[in-house]
Image (cartoon, rainbow, N blue to C red):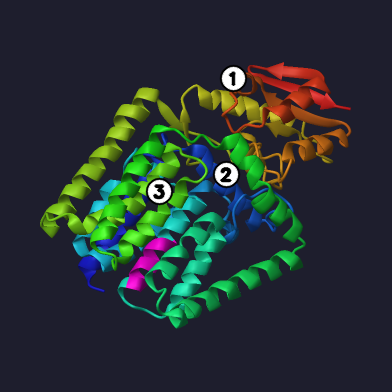
Amino acid sequence: MQIRGCLKYIFLFFFFLLALVIFGYYNNQFDSIWNYGYSYAISIGEIPYRDFTLLTTPLFPYVFSIGLRLFGHDNIVFLIEQAILLTITFYFLFRIFGKKAWIMLLVMCFPFLNGIIPTYNYFAFFLIVVVIFLEKEKKSDYLIGVLLGLIFLTKQSIGVFLLIPTFLLYYKDWRKIVRRLIPFFVLLVLFFLYLIFTDSLLPFLDICVFGLFDFTNHNSVLFTPYFFLAIGMEVILFFLWKKDKKNILYYYSFFCFSFLIPIFTEYHFSLFFMSFMLSIIPFISLPDSYCQWFSIIVSFGIALFNFFVINSGLQTTFLQGVPNFKYYLILKGSDQSFYRTVDLYEKYCTDEKSPIFLGTQAIYFTIIHEEKVDYFDILNRGNYGYHGTEKMIQRIKKMENQIFIVNMDKYESSSSIDQLDTEIIKYVIDHSKKIDSWDCYSVFLKE
């Protein structure tokens, strides 16, 4: 590779790392932190589904746990891994679109860099880009089958939808379909053998199959603005497909609608929008050099606007002296509250057990203290399998002399469409003794 070619990848790596570390305060942070928690848990030897809840197949946290295992658990390691993944994504985008791939840099900056945060959703998008490259280059069907299997092992719902283009494109060539399905199902068999050997098959089926009924019922809000925008984009892709039924981009972009199922939020829409643009880039007739410099300048402008206008206006700061979160931005003033909350948590830690934090921030305290992740760390509705809330309450009933710390503001302000499982918190409040409080936090003892 020429020096100039290397320089663009070095630039992209540092741009994305800066965006993730400095410009990304306004990201959907909990998705990123929860995924960080999954990778952290695996890096210390925990098993998904058996030891902690995970709603998707586990390839992403296993891949990102490698860096955390080798270089420590600090969040900067996790962000560096994501910056590397984003840079590799552009390697394949350049192979597909040439210099027009720079447009994707601009696309990824809307809205406010949400689409680039490290999650299993972005990892699935990366694998989709690789599949499109392999399709364009007419590479081995077996290799494409492996990548389709990896998408399934990253997020099962997207993996199922992304198999459909193979059947639609090659329904007249069953040997081609079979060549793709063989490695796909080999990976599935290996995954199920892994589940059996790690004693996590039944928890996986409960959480990721049967539990999805609970998750959809509690967390799905269909008719958001992003739903109607996504439907409009699907209509555009349909008409593009009608004009050119052999173009693989339209097939894969169309079925990337699965990023939005079942949660039609800004973050999930960002991933679908990025996938949609894969089909639109070839229609952009601007000179390559114009695409490159326009995208770089505007992307930097968006990132700087985000930092100087939004972050400076909110007066953000990095956490100081907090293990594993040295490069985490937080509101000034909120940092002092965070430190005090850490002190409150540590006040009730003993050699035998730690307090259980009930709220969206629980995973922070687990990672800070390098403790094991468990089912309470991501207290979202539908996260614990079929009728999972009742199962979690049964767990609490069996506990003795357990301390719970509740974010009362978060509990009292949660609505029916919020993901926080307030039924579990209500049970703790109703069946425990309040022994302490500070600011918005109340401490309960379940005797």
Q: Which residue is mark 1?
A: 413
Q: Which residue is mark 2?
A: 34
* Residue furthest to the bottom: 175
Give the left or right position of residue 217, taking residue 18 as reference: right
Q: Where in the figure is residue 129, as x and y percent of width and height?
A: 37, 62
Q: Earlier in the sequence, mark 1 or mark 2?
A: 2
Q: Earlier in the sequence, mark 3 or mark 2?
A: 2
* Residue 353 seen in this snapshot: yes
Label 1, label 2: how far apart the Cα atoms are:
21 Å
For the residue labelled by badge 3, is the local secondary structure a helix, a strand or a loop?
Answer: helix
Q: Main secondary structure of the magenta part?
A: helix
Residue 146 part of the magenta-drawn span: no
* Amino acid type, callout 3: Leu
Q: How many marks?
A: 3
Q: Which residue is mark 3?
A: 271
Q: Where in the figure is residue 10, as x and y percent of width and height?
A: 30, 59
